[in-house]
Amino acid sequence: MKLLTIIGARPQIIKASALSRAIRQQFADQITEVLVHTGQHYDENMSAVFFEELEIPQPDYNLQVGSGSHGQQTAKMIMGVEEILEKENPTYVVIFGDTNSTLAGAIAASKRHVPIVHIEAGLRSYNKRMPEEINRIVSDHVSTYLFTPTQAGTDNLKKEGFLLTNSPPYTIDRPGIFQVGDIMYDNSLYFSELAAQRTTILEKLNVQGGDYTLITIHRNANTDDSNRLNGIFRALQIITATYSVKLVLPLHPRTAKQMNALLEPELYQAIHTNPNIILIPPVSFLEMTTLEKNAQRIITDSGGVQKEAYFFKKPCLILRAETEWIEIVKEGAAILCDADPYRILGAYAHFETNPVIPFISLYGDGTAAYQIIDILLGEDGNKPTTNKF
Ligand code: UD1
Ligand code: UDP
């Protein structure tokens, strides 16, 4: 069986590491994986660092598309992937999540009638102004194997008319839907201990377990809108004035650029001279895991970081009006704050006095990659493994 796996953005490289690891560890004699990097993310700390640290094989192809408008970026990727498909003739194309790299893989593969495996299928924010929502909807509707991470993901597909009968043969018109849990949970479990052993990020930043809040911001709705970006940073400034806490912000390059362009000069100055606000470049996955595990709480607009907050039992403030990971909000472990300073401060105060319990299991058992491989091997005429993982 030959898998052609398409990655491009930071979270996809991280997710792909779980699948590649499972292939190398147990299925190397049955599966060949061809790795295609679209080049959507290209800075050393947004891409290369993850290959080294998570021991992912170097990509077989790098399309080096770089940044650009949605149309430019996606079009270049489709052209590149199409050529590779012709050459490699894979059994399946594997796509992850909801980025432009996901969409490009979905369009190129579906038009060449290569069955698509969509990992992290079925998620919806029900906000079609999000580029990711368009990418998800299109990708799901041209996939043959839809691996959902959560009950909400499975339910969303049902609402869109997907049949939930899991009997082969699966086709693009009658796809198989399998709820296998979240592949990111595989990684967080696998790397949790290693992160503590191999990183010195807490010492480097001079922070200690429980004395800081970890923050990430990168959603285009927040970084490209002056009101929202200023609102978020005003709230952060007030948090440091009100509570005895440090704020650690590994900045996505998009956010660093937009802070320079859009923050009001006084606020920019205040943020950059505030000794309790620690602005740093993006960190590696093991460093991020260490920062998450030791944070008092987490504030983010990232999809992945919201979930990792839950994996590590940290209360989370979500800087969005809605989320695809609705179950953590329903559990009371996360609060939707949008980019509203009042809501951010209200949620921050809420978690000061209301600890979250009990963090029930929502994302499977950390064997998503193995379950996916097992199902695909069974489909390809191989005997599925009898492992119970
Ligand atoms: C993309 C995904 C988003 C995902 C995020 C993960 C889309 C539409 N968006 O958003 O769903 O959550 O990745 O991080 O696919 N840049 C650099 N260096 C890099 C990469 C980006 O400087 O290595 C800067 C460029 O100015 C670029 C901007 O960041 O224009 C945005 O990058 P892009 O890949 O278009 O979108 P993200 O915001 O990263
Ligand atoms: N991450 C990282 N370093 C950072 C910020 C995030 O390794 O400086 C990891 C994080 O732990 C998670 C993933 O990147 O696994 C989330 O990616 P991102 O927030 O860029 O995108 P999203 O999940 O929102 O698509």
Image (cartoon, helix red, strand yellow):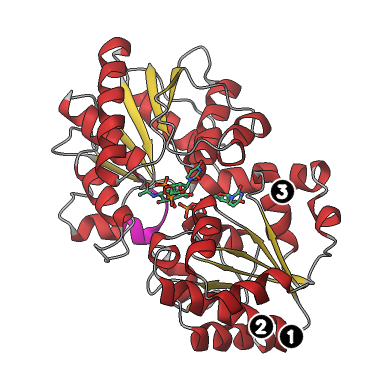
**Quadrant of the image occupied by residue 74:** top left
Q: Separation of disc 1 and disc 3 at Cα? A: 25 Å
User: What is the quadrant of the N terminus in the image?
Assistant: top left
Magenta stretch containing residue 148, yes or no?
yes
The image quarter in which residue 186 lies:
top right
Cα distance between the residues tagged 2 and 1? 6 Å
Bin the neighbour count of mark 3 within 10 Å (Cα to Cα): few under 14, some 14-19, many 20 and up. Answer: some
Q: Which residue is mark 2?
A: 239
- On whether ligand 2 comes within 8 Å of the CB at mark 2, the answer is no
Amino acid at the residue labelled 2: Ile
Q: From the image, state whether disc 3 or disc 2 is nearer to you.
A: 2
| Residue closer to the observer: 236 or 60 | 236
What range is drawn magenta here?
144-154
Please give the residue where the numbered disc 1 appears in the rendered image. Answer: 243
Mark 3 CB in 8 Å range of ligand 2?
yes
Residue 114: in magenta span? no
**Any part of residue 379 in sight:** no
